[in-house]
Amino acid sequence: MMAHAANPAVLIELNDLASGLFLLCAFGMVATRQAQACLHLFMAQSFFFGISAILVGIHPLAWDLIAVGLLNFVTKLLLIPWMLRYTVREEVYERREIVQAVNVPTSLLIALGLTIVAYFVAAPMLRAVAETGYAKVNVPIGLAALLLGIYTLAVRREAVPQLMGLLAMENGAFFAGTAIVSGLSLIAELAIAFDALMLTFVMGVLTRAIHEHVGTTEAGGLALLKEK
Amino acid sequence: MAERILFNLLQVAVVVALSPLVSGVLSRLKEIIQSKRGPSIFQPYRDLRKLFRKEQVISQQASWLYQATPYIVFVAPIFVTLLIPVLTAYPLYLAFMGDMLGGGFILALGGFFSTIAAVTTANPYGAMGASRTRMVGFLAEPVFMIVFFTISFVAGSTIPYIVQQYWVTPPTNFFEPAHVLLVLAFLMLILAETGRIPVDNPSGHFELAMIDESKTLEYSGSGAALMKWGGQMKMFVLLCIFLNVVVTPWGLAIGTSPGAVLLAIPLVLLKILAFLVVLVIIESSLSKLRLFRISEFLGAAFLTSMAAMITQFLKT
């Protein structure tokens, strides 16, 4: 605990800044209408997650957290966008607005409500874990991002934005995790990183196949069985 | 004491004299970025002089509100100037009279009267513009409130001079998440309040699409000049609050010598110029939102300000 008490204030301050922007990106993913903007916001969110993981890893020094941050840059800023471009190019890069079950202003208010819920859920958790300077901000915001990811997943009616919601959930869970579990093994993050990649790839291929067969990837439109 | 009164008057003189220049520079920059040459940066002065010389035509149906409004719109930003740091980092003679919320109320008073006056003219476009302005206004109001509450929550005060000091020392305060997010929310608010492009097109001349401009359509002669000048001063004052208090709280006069205060004028203008470049880039790279999507824009601003408040709340 002494080592935690000696955390340089600057690192905490920068981590708080990254957390604030992380939350903003999560809000942005709920608010945006364009598939491409959604992807860009997801990339920005992953970027701030990576920054935060590295900052948490600097003091007290934890190489695995720094590695997690760097790995995160490689997978989420390079590989996932590349893979989406490769598999579902027209869904993300060439198209249009996302169909959403709830309109945007209502979504924004719900997002706000979810954030407040996350705050109250995180409070007892914070009492349970040893409270480092980072966890105080990271755990509620990570939980909020998780809930916002679930919300995105629920209201978006198309495959690719739903995938974004899923990946954002993973971001949120890890964002909260890096701050409380000091010895998070690298293996876990490696497994998750490959998982996320495989997920993207499978979803991409699947989406493409559905698109070829049905002509649309609107999940809401796939509810009924139809004769050809 | 005497010099504080003098500096206060100087501050007002700066706002009154230089606000048309700012709007001239803004339109010139916009033309340059669209690869046109554009009018001289002194064109707003010429426009004002021309309008003051012209005869004022007043509709027979117009009430006294219609005639009083240009003066209220012109005077409101001057009152706000007395309260906020335009040139100096220390409070001047009349600054004790109100805080930032007070300034907001005075600016809103000008907006209120121009709305009422637009309705009394019986020009259909006036009433349409007035109701649209109110729509943008009431959507911007919660953002305005949360931004100011967060500022006062973070800095422990609503007096602009104390807030401004808080961001300057120690420098780590400047990089607080709440500060960065507040700047974003405030920027979106300023775009909405001054009728800039994602919300309203200031250079549009199509009456059906106008929001802010249609309120002044009925005015002519000196009334039009006062309304125009008042609008330019409102923009200048908002930029002063945004830049001097929130974004770049440096470059204001700290000493009480006349030289230091005079030196602050070019520094403040430089800050405004830098911001105008950013504004022009925003305006040229976005398109105007449809009327019913303005609520989404301001909803995003509201969430940004709430994110600022939440991160600040988590830290303490």
Image (cartoon, coloured by chain):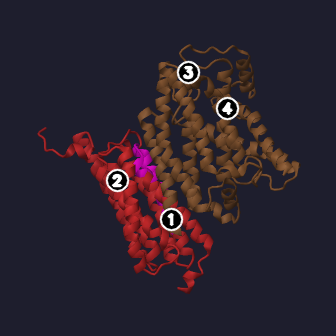
Chain colours: A red, B brown
Going from N to C along the chain, the mark reached first, 1 or 4, is: 4
The residue carrying pointer 4 sits among few (fewer than 14), some (14 to 19) or many (20 or more) residues within 10 Å by Cα, namely many
- Residue A67 in the image: above or below residue A96: below
For the stretch drawn in magenta, what is the main secondary structure? helix
Q: Which residue is mark 3?
A: B63
Precedes in sequence: disc 3 or disc 1: 3
Q: Which residue is mark 1?
A: B313
The percent coordinates of residue A152 (x first, y second) are: 34, 53
Q: CA distance from mark 2 to mark 3?
A: 52 Å
- Look at the picture and state if B84 lies above or below A62: above
The circle drawn on residue B74 is 4
Badge 3 and badge 1 in a common chain: yes
Q: Quadrant of residue B17?
A: top right
Q: Secondary structure at mark 2?
A: helix
Q: Nearer the viewer, residue A139 or B5?
A: B5
Q: Is residue B255 left or right of residue B95?
A: right
- Name the element at disc 3: loop
Residue A152, disc: 2
- Work out whether mark 3 precedes mark 4 in sequence or the reverse, and give the earlier one: 3
- What type is the residue that disc 4 sits on? Phe
**Seen in the image, is B120 located left or right of residue B234?**
left
Stretch in magenta: A28-52
